[in-house]
Image: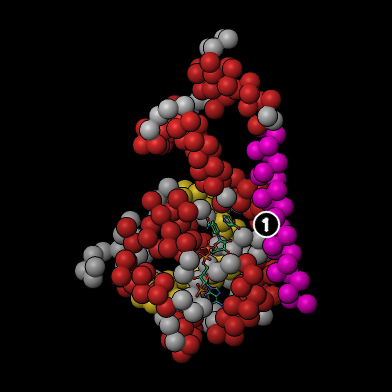
């Protein structure tokens, strides 16, 4: 890939090399925003996983402790992408290695800016984000909250990184748990709905391939209709729903099952769970 002009001339390290790190790295590389040689990925111990990422994307990986330390001390942007339960230990380790010019960006659900800075042991510039796995194909939706210490230039850099893999919205940190309930975890709700529609199709006699194709196109078409017509989902729903017709009958069943209330409760519970995970991290400080 050397010789190909990329948008950002910065070194980025993923500290944690799981699904979310892969989704963002893959999106950044395929969109030409970062070259694979500007990306280092590292994890705790799974060497096979690092080999897989090297083979798939040509990224650099750091395996030995000395190599990891070197990356953490020198890389422009460090993206914290481990599970919340592993974050406290990782941040405590990272804090003393950081120098002032480096930027720390977290994708970790629940972990507040205050907790990050306390665990790092200083008011280092940090960014709290909530992306989603659709970043893999450039259709992600990421919420971003900056700590006061993040410069305008670094705010622009982070925006550019995440805009390369989807849409970005800058939010007040107080709303990021709700945002997690909508867009961070949201893809899973849509997949769950799709699973149910496909199962129902097969139960009614369609082949699994037919049920899959029809469901996928229906979800895709419905999302695109909202995006491209500018009409509200409610108005678009009414256009599908003939008086006393089949859609009205189906919506009636969903309403009887408290569909909207159930979705609201799911989003609320997701946000609450994010806060619980954040509080568990806060407790680790004391
Ligand atoms: N998946 C999703 O849809 C989304 C996830 N997130 C957030 O992304 C984060 C990661 O989630 P996900 O990718 O699903 O998780 P995964 O379990 O897929 O990956 C976690 C990674 O972190 C690594 N890790 C754990 N501890 C350390 C450590 N001390 N030092 C370095 N690496 C470490 C693991 O390495 P090893 O395997 O060697 O232990 C693994 O590579 C979570 O905090 C989650 O809240 C945010 C938005 C969406
Ligand atoms: O389930 C989780 O905790 C993470 C956060 C958002 C999506 N996955």
Q: Position of residue 78 (x, y in %)?
A: 49, 72
Q: Is residue 86 magenta?
A: no
Q: Main secondary structure of the magenta part?
A: helix
Q: Position of residue 130 (x, y in %)?
A: 56, 56
In the displayed structure, 27 sits above or below 206; it is below
Q: Residue furthest bottom?
A: 66
Instruction: Name the spot of residue 180 as percent of width and height, x first.
Output: 61, 51
Image quarter hosting the N terminus? bottom left
The residue located at (54%, 22%) in the rendering is 237
**Mark 1 Cα within 10 Å, few/some/many (few <14, many 20+)?**
many
Mark 1 C-beta to ligand 2 under 8 Å: yes
Determine whether, in the image, residue 220 is placed left or right of residue 234: left
Residue 250: in sight, yes or no? Answer: yes
**Which residue is rendered at x = 42% and y = 63% of the image?**
22
For the point 57% across and 50% down, the residue is 185
Q: Is residue 270 magenta?
A: yes
Q: Residue furthest right?
A: 286
Rendering coords of residue 134 (x, y %): 45, 50
The one of 38 and 86 positioned closer to us in this rendering: 86
Q: Left or right: 249 with respect to 227?
A: right
The residue wearing badge 1 is 274
SS at circle 1: helix
Q: Quadrant of residue 218?
A: top left
Task: Tell me the magenta residue range.
Answer: 260-286
Quadrant containing the C terminus in the rendered view: bottom right
């Amino acid at each position: 890939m050397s010789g190909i002009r990329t948008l950002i001339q910065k070194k980025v390290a993923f500290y944690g090399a799981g699904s979310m790190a892969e989704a963002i790295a893959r999106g950044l590389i395929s969109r030409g925003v970062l070259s694979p040689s500007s990306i280092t990925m590292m994890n705790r111990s799974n060497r096979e996983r690092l080999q897989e990422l090297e083979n798939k994307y040509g990224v650099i990986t750091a395996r030995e402790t000395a190599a990891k330390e070197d990356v953490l001390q020198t890389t422009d942007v460090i993206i914290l992408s481990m599970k919340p339960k592993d974050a406290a230990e990782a941040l405590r380790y990272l804090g003393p290695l950081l120098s002032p010019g480096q930027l720390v960006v977290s994708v970790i659900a629940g972990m507040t800016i205050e907790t990050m800075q306390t665990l790092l042991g200083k008011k280092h510039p940090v960014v709290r984000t909530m992306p989603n796995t659709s970043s893999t194909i450039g259709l992600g939706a990421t919420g971003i909250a900056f700590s006061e210490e993040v410069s305008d230039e670094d705010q622009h850099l982070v925006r550019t990184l995440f805009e390369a893999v989807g849409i970005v919205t800058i939010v007040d940190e107080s709303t990021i748990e709700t945002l997690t309930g909508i867009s961070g975890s949201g893809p899973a709700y849509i997949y769950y709905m799709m699973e149910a529609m496909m199962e129902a199709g097969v139960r009614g006699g369609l082949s699994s391939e037919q049920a899959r194709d029809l469901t996928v196109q229906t979800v895709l078409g419905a999302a695109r209709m909202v995006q491209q017509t500018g009409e509200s989902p409610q108005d678009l729903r009414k256009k599908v729903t003939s008086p006393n017709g089949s859609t009205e009958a189906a919506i009636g069943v969903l309403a009887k099952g408290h569909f909207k209330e159930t979705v609201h409760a799911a989003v609320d519970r997701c946000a609450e769970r994010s806060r619980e995970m954040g509080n568990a991290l806060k407790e680790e400080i004391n």
